[in-house]
Image: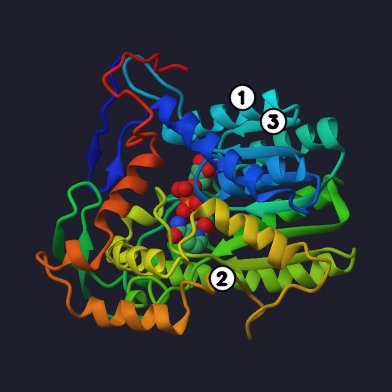
């Protein structure tokens, strides 16, 4: 089959297996070039098939030689439909890890469910007895409560008042204005239920109860703050409430884990184009400005660079990681640098359909968006026939 990108509303409906494999190979090459990473050797990544989770797994496996178990929710190819990008990315990880002699296991299923937690615990026991490092990197729009069966949905809405936001179409590069209505109390609560820390805590408790969390184990979950410009939709919006909850969970888990010498952290990461961030209004536009400015200053990083810096300069240096006043690790430090944010704010005021191509790195955003789905790699011949079930 010939696979060209099919994009609707900033969501790419298909993926290219060869391009996804190249994406993984390039991340691995980057890790190898960067040199060995000090990190634990038995690692569980929840949300391992894409974005920050995939890069965390690659950094741990190829940088530190870790045995890894990755949990993700992806769909295989069916008939003429390609598999999801994360499916191909995960397949590629497995192939490369196998070739490098790195022990690995991928579990595809709903991480929110009891069954997947139980299956993971069984796999940990048989493959590595215990885990020393748990990365929680889920981004999901829905969660089914494992006890009640009730389905919760996360929304990306402002709180208290409607918000008029400029948005960027990652495919065409066009700017449009849209009003995002204020969230209801119910929508806030549902978003916290999906993207807050409840499931992370359930995972850590299940791993402890199953006897597979090693004494001294470290866990990290990923959060985001961003600039004031995106506060109405992000940090002061529904997703921000969920992140507040996630960060509170880190503090309570940290108290529990310290009893056995372990730690729980939240790392605030840099804004990047991933499947999750592309659908947040205003964020792709901010990303376009941010990418240009950070690239000009030689500060731009992707998920793999972020994860390497997190592991080697913050989490596993042998010292207490540096944290902010709320106890969070800040790997968004370069994004939030005053000079970077001053420029973003200055240019934000000037954005129009006409000025955006000059002010923002729209091409960089489009390129990243395509690449996370395996498209836009000059090395790949997209007119060639490919096997979708690979
Ligand atoms: P992503 O969309 O690239 O990856 C999400 C992962 O979660 C995938 O592996 C997917 O399979 C998995 N997943 C989703 N639902 C699942 C389920 N029910 N069961 C099992 N696996 C499931 O997302 P991204 O952007 O890497 O986000 C990961 C975390 O990083 C999120 O907490 C996000 O808020 C945070 N973050 C993201 C930033 C960004 O700019 N993309 C910036 C800072 C933090």
Which of the two discs, 2 and 1, labels the residue nearer the N terminus? 1
The residue that mark 3 highlights is 105
Whole-percent x and y of residue 73? 52, 37
Q: What is the distance, in whole Å, between disc 2 and disc 3 at their CAs?
A: 30 Å
Q: Earlier in the sequence, mark 1 or mark 3?
A: 1
**Depth check: 271 or 148 in front?**
271
Residue drawn at x 79%, y 74% is 320
- Residue 246 visible? The answer is yes
* Residue 66 percent location from the top left of the image: 77, 41
> What crowding class fits label 1: few (fewer than 14 Cα within 10 Å), some (14-19), or many (20 or more)?
some
Q: Residues within 10 Å of mark 2 (few under 14, many from 20)?
A: some
Q: Which residue is mark 2?
A: 245
- Across and down, in percent, residue 4 comes to 26, 28
Q: Alpha carbon of mark 1 to alpha carbon of mark 3: how far?
A: 11 Å
Badge nearest the viewer, 1 or 3: 1
Which of the labelled discs sits on residue 95, or is there none?
1
| Cβ of mark 2 under 8 A from ligand 1 | no
Q: Is residue 136 above or below residue 43?
A: below
Residue lying at 83% horizontally and 45% vertically, measured from the top left = 210
The location of residue 288, given as percent across then percent down, is 30, 62
10 Å crowding of disc 3: few (<14), some (14-19), many (20+): some
Q: Please give left or right for residue 281 compared with residue 235 in the image.
A: left
Mark 1: is the Cβ under 8 angstroms from ligand 1?
no
Residue 337 located left or right of residue 70: left
Q: Nearer the viewer, mark 2 or mark 1?
A: 1
């Amino acid at each position: 089959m010939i696979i060209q990108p099919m994009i609707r509303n900033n969501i790419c409906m298909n993926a290219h297996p060869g391009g996804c494999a190249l994406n993984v190979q390039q991340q691995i090459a980057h890790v190898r070039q960067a040199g060995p990473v000090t990190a634990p050797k038995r690692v569980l990544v929840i949300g391992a098939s894409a974005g920050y989770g995939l890069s965390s797994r690659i950094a741990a496996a190829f940088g530190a030689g870790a045995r890894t178990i990755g949990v993700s929710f992806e769909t295989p190819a069916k008939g003429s439909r390609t598999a999801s990008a994360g499916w191909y990315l995960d397949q590629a990880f497995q192939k490369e890890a196998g070739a490098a002699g790195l022990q690995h296991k991928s579990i595809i299923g709903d991480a929110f469910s009891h069954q997947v937690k139980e299956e993971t615990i069984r796999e940990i026991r048989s493959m590595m007895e215990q885990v020393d490092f748990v990365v929680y990197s889920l981004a999901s729009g829905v969660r089914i409560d494992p006890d009640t069966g009730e389905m919760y949905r996360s929304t990306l809405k402002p709180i208290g008042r409607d918000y008029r936001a400029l948005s960027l179409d990652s495919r065409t590069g066009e700017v449009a204005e849209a009003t995002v209505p204020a969230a209801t109390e119910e929508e806030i609560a549902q978003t916290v239920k999906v993207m807050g820390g409840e499931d992370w805590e359930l995972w850590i408790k299940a791993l402890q109860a199953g006897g597979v969390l090693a004494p001294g184990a470290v866990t990290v979950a990923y959060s985001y703050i961003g600039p004031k410009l995106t506060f109405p939709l992000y940090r002061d919006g529904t997703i921000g409430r969920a992140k507040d909850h996630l960060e509170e969970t880190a503090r309570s888990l940290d108290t529990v884990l310290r009893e056995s010498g372990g730690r729980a952290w939240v790392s605030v990461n840099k804004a990047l184009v991933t499947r999750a961030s592309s659908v947040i209004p205003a964020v792709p536009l901010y990303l376009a400005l941010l990418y240009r400015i950070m690239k000009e200053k030689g500060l731009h990083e992707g998920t793999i660079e972020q994860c390497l810096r997190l592991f080697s300069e913050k989490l596993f240096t042998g010292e207490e990681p540096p944290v902010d006043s709320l106890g969070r690790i800040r790997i968004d430090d370069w994004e939030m640098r005053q000079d970077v944010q001053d420029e973003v704010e200055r240019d934000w005021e000037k954005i129009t359909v006409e000025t955006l191509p000059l002010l923002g790195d729209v091409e960089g955003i489009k390129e990243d968006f395509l690449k996370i789905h395996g498209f836009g790699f000059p090395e790949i011949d997209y007119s060639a026939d490919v096997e979708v079930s690979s």
